[in-house]
Each structure stands twice: as structure tokens, then as C-alpha cells.
Image (cartoon, rainbow, N blue to C red):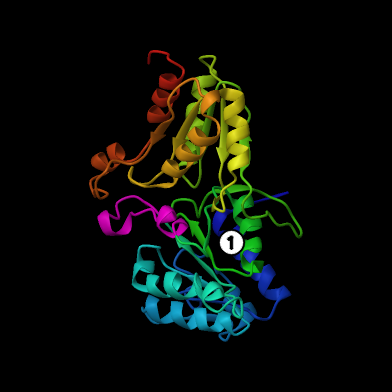
Amino acid sequence: MKTIQFREAICEAMSEEMRRDESIYLMGEEVAEYNGAYKASKGMLDEFGAKRVIDTPISELGFAGIATGSAMNGNRPIVEFMTFNFSLVGIDQIINNAAKIRQMSGGQFNCPIVFRGPTASAGQLAATHSQAFESWFANTPGLKVVVPSNPADAKGLLKSAIRDDDPVIFMESEQMYGDKGEVPEGEYLIPLGVADIKRKGTDVTIVSFGKIIKEAYAAAEQLAKEGIECEIIDLRTVRPMDHKTILDSVKKTNRLVILEEAWPFGNVATEITYQVQSQAFDYLDAPIVKINTADTPAPYSPALLAEWLPNKEDVMAAVKKVMYRTA
């Protein structure tokens, strides 16, 4: 094992795959000369050259379309969006072309492409730069959606995403790029669609993903001092979703809390809630509790932003609620 930053894990995954397969290339704003907006492609231009690490104009629709057509013709592009907020400019190419071409062509074309970059809030970036898009893209048949929460998962999942023959949305966080963690050395992949039990517990299941899962870890440590043992499941892949791991855990703990950094209406937590109540209702000893952001655009004020985001205290309160314990 070695300890590296999240951004370094991303860079290693891309570089290893590009060494393995010459059809893979990286394109996006500032990925080459500037080493990436968040330095996730540091050194890649020097190693692979300007034909495989390509700086693009500020035109997400344009380069998303170029990459989609390229993928249909035998290449395996990685497209970096500086933030998924900017992917809205290119979303027509992602949803109406990349996601649908296999079905629309009767299987004659596939589209092995990875769209990657940061999602959700990242401090004082305000309303138009603080949106979570996991549920948006997961609502689209033909797309796979991956949201790692640590460097090891980021590397293993990204390598699998690059090798996948269908389009993958790979969502990171500006606030995780500097996170450090142990990453296995040598070749390793994590299969898409497999959740991971990060913490074993017997009293309550907490399901989360991405950077907000850190609040679940902090809450679980505090709750353990009070005699409540939480089982924490990291989804890792939002679509396809690992329903079995969630259901098996709920059948053991009989209680479920879902923590997600997204607006409350029609999100990933809503889908999990439906699946659990439809397949494991008789195992539930309390109603499922969802924890989300406030149902407003993200504020700029640090004080308001702290109130807007879910936190450790919210998780603890939710766990005690399903345990029928007073705060």
C-alpha cells in the first residue's frame, strides 16, 4: 500500500490505462498545459503528448460531441469537465447521443467514454456552481454513474470505468482532491455496481456516497460511544445500484438512514427508499429517514451554507429517531 492524494489516484488510473491502450485519450479545459484545473492530470502532457492530452476551448457542447463521435468510431476518450455544473452546456450530447446510441443503432455502435469531474458543493461557489448531478444522470438509461469517496476507490473504479464499453459518468469533488488515503500498488480494479460496507454495525444502516459520507463516519464514531453501532454502506456506484448489499444490511439492522448531498425531491435516496420499502418492508422497525440539503439553491454565505449542508449532527439525530431514542 502507498498513501497518495485523491487527485494522484485519478491521475494514476488515467495514466496506467493510457499506457495500456493507445485508443484512450484525455480532453477538457486546462487538462494539458495547466496540468488540470485541480492538478488531476499533472505530468500527463509530458508523458503522452498533445495528441492524447488535449486542451479544449471553453465549449462543453463541442468537446463532449467530438468525444462522443470519437468513441463511436473506436476510441475511448476521457472527458474532464472543470465542474459538472458546466456539463449542462453539453448535456444534450451526453444524454441524447452517448447514452442512447447503442439502443438507437440496434447494437451497431457502442460509446466507451468517461465523463469525469467534480460535483456538488465546494465551499463558497454559490448557487450555480454547487449542484449535485448524480440523480440527474442516473435517471438516464444507458449511463452508468460512479461517485467514489476515497483515493483507493477512485483509482479502482476509474480504471473499470475507462474499460467499460458504455458511457460512464464519474463524479468527484473539489474538496476531496487533497484527501490522502492508502491505495494498493500494482494493477487493481473495482467492479462497477458493487457497494462497500465501510463500517460494520448491528443497530442502524446508513447508506451514503461521495464526500458527504465523511459526516456519517463522524456520527458513527460518536454514536458508538453512546452504545449505538451503525453499519455504513458506501454505494460507490449509483447506477447500477447494489440493492442486495443495502437490503441484506437492513434485514440485519431493521433501520435505515440515507445521507445524500442533494436536494430532497426525486433523488438517489428516494430510489433507495422505494426499493427497501418494496422489498424489505416487513424487516423495518421504523420509517426510513432521508437526510438531504435544504430545498433551496446553495447559498454563498458560509453561515448559511453550513445550515444548508447535511452534517454529523443531522446524522446523529436521524439515527436516534429511527432508534426511538431522545436526542
User: What residue type is disc 1 on?
Assistant: Ile
Query: Residue at image x 54%, y 48%?
Result: 149
Q: How many marks?
A: 1
Vertical placement of residue 176 versus 222, above or below: below
Q: Identify the residue position indicated by label 1 in the image.
A: 10
In this view, the residue in front, 129 or 133, is 133
Is 137 magenta? The answer is: yes
Q: Which residues are magenta?
A: 120-139
Left or right: 322, with 203 as reference point: left
Q: Position of residue 219 (x, y in %)?
A: 47, 28
Q: Position of residue 310 (x, y in %)?
A: 37, 37
Residue 274 position in % (x across, y down): 46, 39
Q: Is residue 309 left or right of residue 214?
A: left
> Does residue 88 show up?
yes
The C terminus: image quadrant: top left
Residue ID at (60%, 51%): 151
Magenta span includes 201:
no
Residue at 40 percent of width and 57 percent of height = 136
Identify the residue at the far right of this view.
186
* Label 1: few (<14), some (14–19) or many (≥20) C-alpha neighbours in 10 Å: many
Q: Secondary structure at mark 1?
A: helix
For the question of whether residue 35 can be seen, the reply is no
Q: Looking at the image, which residue is at 56% across and 72% down?
A: 113
Q: Is residue 86 above or below residue 272?
A: below
Which percent across, then down, holds residue 139? 44, 57
